[in-house]
Amino acid sequence: MIYKSKKQAVDLTDMAVGILVIGLVVTIGATVLLNIQAGRLTSLDEVTTTNESFLASDGGTTLDNVWYSSLGKITNATDGATIPATNYTITTDANNGIATVDFVASSLHNGSNVFATYNTYNTSRADYALAGSAATGLAEFGNWFNIIVIVGIAAVILSLIFMAFGNRGESGVSY
């Protein structure tokens, strides 16, 4: 009796599961680190910026320092008079903490130089910066993730080609 040996099909399940697990770990890890970092933000010390100069505008002007916490006051650069809060609004971008001062269109201070005194969170503290650096590192791995997947697929394709054409010298008969 002559038996032909059948070659096993290449099982890609392990590779697919591995790629999926790596992707999930990176995604969940980065999310956890960013949540840890965000949770520490309001416990940081505050730094005061005094008399930052800018031109009052109803188009909005961003303050120089990030992670805005609170406003001390806005004063007229010419006479030093405090400008009432009814003349402007302040909005903060939740993603980067950049504050924008937008003067009301009818404000007499539009087009004039003003000074702002405000507080920001000191994000240089190690327990805050470490979580952000680790999340950035995971994001860098994410940039390489596509390349890793492409190289893995190329390796599978090459192994299939070698399996198909590499064993032509064998008789395929076993006893």
Image (cartoon, rainbow, N blue to C red):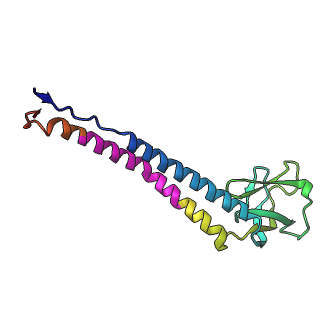
Q: Quadrant of the C terminus?
A: top left
**Residue drawn at (58%, 51%) of the image:** 28
> In the image, is residue 149 part of the stretch drawn in magenta?
yes
Instruction: Report the side of 79 relative to 151 (left or right).
Output: right
Instruction: Report the side of 112 relative to 41 (left or right).
Output: right
Q: Position of residue 95 (x, y in %)?
A: 68, 54
**Residue drawn at (34%, 46%) of the image:** 152
Q: Quadrant of the N terminus?
A: top left
Residue that sits furthest to the top in the current view: 1
Q: Position of residue 164 (x, y in %)?
A: 18, 35
| Image: magenta residue range | 137-159
Instruction: Report the side of 152 relative to 76 (left or right).
Output: left
The one of 160 and 107 positioned closer to us in this rendering: 160
Q: Position of residue 34 (x, y in %)?
A: 64, 57
Q: Main secondary structure of the magenta part?
A: helix
The one of 112 and 30 positioned closer to us in this rendering: 30
Relative to 21, residue 169 above or below: above
**Residue drawn at (58%, 55%) of the image:** 30
Residue that sits furthest to the front in the current view: 1
Relative to 120, residue 142 above or below: above
Query: Hey, which quadrant is residue 47 in on the image?
Result: bottom right
Query: Hey, which quadrant is residue 136 in on the image?
Result: bottom right
Q: Position of residue 5 (x, y in %)?
A: 17, 32
Query: Hey, which quadrant is residue 35 in on the image?
Result: bottom right
Q: How many marks?
A: 0
**Residue drawn at (89%, 54%) of the image:** 87
The one of 121 and 2 positioned closer to us in this rendering: 2
> In the image, is residue 20 part of the stretch drawn in magenta?
no
Instruction: Report the side of 79 relative to 118 (left or right).
Output: right
